[in-house]
Each structure stands twice: as C-alpha cells, then as structure tokens.
Image (spheres, grey):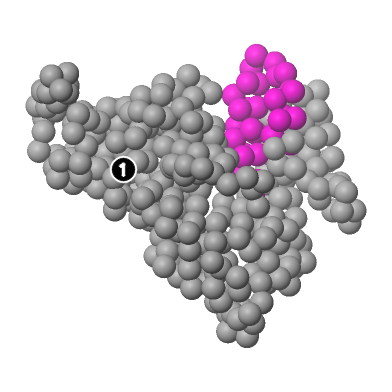
Amino acid sequence: MPKKKLKHITPENYLKYYYDVPHEGKTSAGKPLRRLKDITCPYRGIKIIPTDTIKGFEKNLSRCVTAKDGVELLSNYQKYMLPVEKSIFAIFKDFVKINPEDDLQNCLQMIKTNCLTRLKLEEMEVLDDVDRLTRRLSPQTALKIRAKTTKCRQIIISSSSKDTFKRKTFLSSLEEIIPHENEREILSNIKNKALFLPTSESSRNAFVVKYSKRSQTEIIRRIFIASTGSIEHVTPASNGGLNTIGNFLLTTASGNRYRENMPMCEYIKRHPKIPQYMQMYIDDIIREIHKGNLQGNETYPYKIKKKLYEESCGRIMISLSKYKYTEEEAAKAVEAYEHRYEKH
C-alpha cells in the first residue's frame, strides 16, 4: 500500500503513483485524448477503461475486505481485462467459490511455487535467444554478454531468497557493453530481444510471483490499472520524441509500460495484430471527432498516421477513408477553433 493517500486523483498522478508509467507527467498535450471514451487500445485491441471511473473505483476498493468483495468489484471491469489479468481473475473466481471470506493474496501464495518454476523457464528461454544472437558478434563482445547471461542463469536457478533475478538490472548491464562499429545493430537486436523477458504485463507466472507478496488492495488495483488510459509516445521521449499530440497514442497503461523504449517494429513482432488494432483505434478517434469530442485536433489522424508509418518502418498503414475531413479541411477546422479560442 502507498504510504500516503492522494489528495487529488488525476489520470496522470494515479498511474505514476500506483503503476510507474514512464513519462506520464510530461503528457499534458494528450489531455484531449485522455477525455475520450470507448476507445480501442492500439496495442492490445481491448476497450480502454474511461479515466472518469478512477475515483469511483478507489471508493469501492476501500470497502473491499474479503476475497469475495474483490472479485465482485473486479467483475465490473471484466470486459476490459487483458489476457494476463483475465487469467488471474479466472483463478480468483474459482478460489472465491470455496474461500469467499479469505484474502486474494493467499490465493496467489498457494500457487506461487509452481508459477515460480514456470517463470524461471520463461526467463531461461529469452536468455537462450540472447545467447544465440551473440554468435554474430566478435568473440570478445560475445563473451562479455555471455558472462552477463550466465550470471543471470545462476541467480535464476539459485534457491536463495536473497538472490532474485532483476530484469531491469540485466537490461541496464547490457548498456555497459561497448561494441565495435560493425556490431552496433546486432547489439541493438540483442537489447530488443532482452526486453521480452517476462513481466507481470506479459506473463501470468510473473504476475503471481510478484503480487503474491502484495496486499489484496494492491492486487485488485493492479488488475484494474492495467486497462486504464495512458498517454504513450509513439517515438519514445528518450529517443527524441516530442511531447505533442501528434506523437501521442491513448493506450492501456499495461501496453504503454510493457513497450518501454522498444522500437515499434520489435513491438509488432511481439504483438502481430498491432497494425489491425491501430486501425480500430483510429476509427474510434474519427468517430469521436465527428461527434465533436476532439475539437481543435482535427489534424490528429493525419499526424498520427504519418508518425506511425515512420516509426513502424512502413508496417502500420492506416486508412482514413472514414474521415470526413481532407487534410486541408482538417487544418482549417483547427485554425477556426484556435481563432474562436483566442476570442474567448
């Protein structure tokens, strides 16, 4: 549980405070997107939980005492759940049938041992993929990376509770490798592959292991937050991406957090349906613009179409055939809105 309670819950501080979504505090230009409802996540293909439900959820969460209470609250958001969260919720529903007055943390603790074994195998598989890619490097560079993956394996198979494999530590250690000029692209591919190490966003086993140590309140909140709206940089801020709406997507918090700084091309490899989901997303945006819910941002579909095409190396080609504005008409609509705004 957090040490102090938020005085004013906003989408920005809620996600940062409880879920550590990167760069969330630098996205004020994305507020028009954040206010929209019934939007499909362009990364995961599910509908995003509207941000105006956060306060109501927190109020109801404060009343949850038993496992049954938690399941009843989460059932209101089942249609929004992502695969990992949906699978955990299914486990909770079965648990509550037998132990309604128990605690959801106890449920995760009961299955933690088996999940930890499976998680270790998932981690080993990614490290094997990393090692295979080192065959294209010089022996000196390859040995440096292999030393790091070997250390990770030793930690993973260790039975000591003090030795815990830290995904972030391994990712950071790869930044210490200085490759030869002709090895930079290969090392970049290795870093991208390492990003596929399991997290609670991508692996049910990782979720169980991590949240078996957390309170019921944190577990319930985590499942809810995963599907709430978050402003995502198409070109990551760390790579020079601007904090402008033309570089923003409204995504689920989980989709945002799991991508990290992964290039869009690599993220598509992990989730091949992203181009399809992007079209669903833009169709929802167009619907909202036609309803008058994104005034002053009529050029957004054209801007984001270009940005996504560039960032995905041509793999995301959005159709704007449903849009009633030509690019010139959209620009005039923005200009007219700004003129009215200046007058007021």
The region drawn magenta spans 170-198
Q: Tell which of 5 and 292 is nearer to you.
A: 5
Q: x, y percentage for residue 300? A: 25, 31
Q: x, y percentage for residue 88? A: 57, 66
Q: Which residue is depicted at the point 83% across and 34% down?
A: 147
Query: Which secondary structure class fits the magenta region best?
Result: helix
Furthest residue in direction right, as rendered: 160
Q: Which residue is depicted at the point 66% across and 72% down?
A: 103
Q: Horizontal placement of 57 versus 180: left or right?
A: left
Q: Is residue 256 above or below residue 182?
A: below
Q: Is residue 23 visible?
A: yes
Q: Which residue is depicted at the point 77% across and 66% down?
A: 113
Furthest residue in direction top, as rendered: 181
Q: Is residue 276 visible?
A: no
* Quarter containing the C terminus: top left
The quarter holding residue 79 reads bottom left
From the image, tell me which residue sits under label 1: 35
Q: Which residue is depicted at the point 9% across and 38% down?
A: 324
Q: x, y percentage for residue 301? A: 24, 34
Q: Is residue 247 above or below residue 170?
A: above
Q: Tell which of 155 and 137 is nearer to you.
A: 155
Is disc 1 placed on a helix, strand or loop? loop
Q: Is residue 300 above or below residue 276?
A: above
Furthest residue in direction front, as rendered: 7
Q: Horizontal placement of 92 versus 249: left or right?
A: right
Q: Residues within 10 Å of mark 1 (few under 14, many from 20)?
A: some
Q: Is residue 294 above or below residue 273?
A: above
Q: The residue under label 1 is which amino acid type?
A: Arg
Residue 214 lies in the magenta-colored region: no
Q: x, y percentage for residue 203? A: 61, 56
Residue 185 lies in the magenta-colored region: yes
